[in-house]
Each structure stands twice: as structure tokens, then as C-alpha cells.
Amino acid sequence: MDTSHRFVLLGAVEAGKTTLFNALTGSRETVLKTQAMNYEGGMVDTPGEFFSHPRLYHALITTAAEADTLVYVHACNDPEFRLPPGLLEINAGKRVVGVITKIDLPDADPDGAEALLRRHGFHERIFRVSTYMPETLAAFRNYLYGLEEQGKS
Ligand SMILES: Nc1nc2c(ncn2[C@@H]2O[C@H](COP(=O)(O)OP(=O)(O)O)[C@@H](O)[C@H]2O)c(=O)[nH]1
Ligand SMILES: [Mg+2]
């Protein structure tokens, strides 16, 4: 297992993390329920249960601590902000980026989702993506690679 990673995907169950992970890493595996940390191509996918069970927070905190970039993944029809309090503060100084997923859904409200994140003090850059709109994924992927280039120079 390759445990060297730069990006960590964080978000609730069903947020779309594994779908995003597969799209970004080019993995063709079917999206199964994520049971454990999944490392590939400098990216780590995390099980959403880590967000809903405080007794699992330590695993999330450790993984986040090892990453260079934290990616908060939020489904555009999710009415709640899910990032555990303090996680961003613990990782102050790291790159953080938000991704609002599933913007193709009929009930999608990306503006509302973005406002929710902002209300909760999420000040970082936010991307809006859909699996069914490859150009949205490309924009996000390019941003991640851009960050990586900056990090190396
Ligand atoms: N309509 C739509 N569904 C999506 C999108 N991304 C993920 N999903 C679906 O949302 C569900 C949860 O996705 P998954 O990647 O497993 O979420 P995770 O629990 O955060 O890893 C799956 O049924 C996906 O097919 C998207 O952009 N649009
Ligand atoms: Mg998953």
C-alpha cells in the first residue's frame, strides 16, 4: 500500500468522495461502500463514517495531519456542514479546498450549498462538480495539479 499522499478527501457518507477519487485517479473500480482508507496516486479517500462517529475522529485527524491538501467534499443537496469543529484550525497553514458535488441533480442548489459552507467559516476556494460534467472535474483536477506544481517550486 502506498501511504505517501498529498490530498485527503473528507466528507459525509454519500458526499461523492469515492466517485471523485475514482474520477481523479482514473480508477475503474466500482464504487463500493468505503470501508477503510484508500490510497492511490497521491490521494486518500476516507470512509464517511469517520465523520459521523466521534470515536473515529482520531483516524481522520491522523490522516488529515499527514496530508498537504484537505479537500472537503459536500453534496449540493446536503443541508448540513459536516467538517468536524477544529479540524481546519488543527491543520492551519495547509491548503484547503471545498468541492460541492452532484450539481447535476434536479434539486441541486449549489449557491445554497456554497452559502452554507461560507456561513460555517469555510473561506477557501470552492469548486462545483458533477460526475456527469467532465469539464467540471477537469477544472478541479487542474487546480489540484496546479497546487502540486506550486508546492514543488
Ligand atoms: N447525480 C450524481 N450522483 C453522484 C455524483 N457523484 C456521486 N454520486 C452518487 O452518490 C452516491 C455516493 O457516492 P460515493 O462516491 O460513494 O460517496 P462517498 O460515500 O462520499 O464515497 C453514489 O450513488 C454515486 O453514484 C454526481 O456528481 N452526480
Ligand atoms: Mg466512499
Image (cartoon, grey):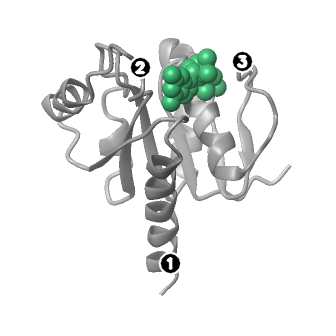
Mark 1 is surrounded, within 10 Å at the Cα level, by few (under 14), some (14 to 19) or many (20 or more) other residues, namely few
- Classify residue 127 as left or right of residue 16: left
Mark 3 highlights which residue? 33
Residue 49: quarter of image: top right
Residue under the point 25% across and 26% down: 113
Residue closest to the eye, 73 or 95: 73
Whether disc 3's CB lies below 8 Å from ligand 2 is answered yes
Please state which amino acid type lies under the numbered disc 3.
Lys
Q: Secondary structure at mark 3?
A: loop
Calculate the distance from the C-alpha at mark 2 to the C-alpha at mark 1: 33 Å
Q: How many marks?
A: 3
Mark 1 highlights which residue? 149
Residue 94 drawn at (x, y percent): 38, 58
> Which quadrant of the frame does ligand 1 lie within?
top right
Mark 2 is surrounded, within 10 Å at the Cα level, by few (under 14), some (14 to 19) or many (20 or more) other residues, namely few
Whether disc 2's CB lies below 8 Å from ligand 1 is answered yes
- Classify residue 141 as left or right of residue 26: left
Residue 96 drawn at (x, y percent): 37, 51
- Mark 1 or mark 3: whose residue is earlier in sequence: 3
Please state which amino acid type lies under the numbered disc 2.
Leu
Residue 138 drawn at (x, y percent): 51, 56
Q: Secondary structure at mark 2?
A: loop
| Residue 57 appearing in the image | no
Mark 2 highlights which residue? 105
* Figure check: 142 above or below 112: below
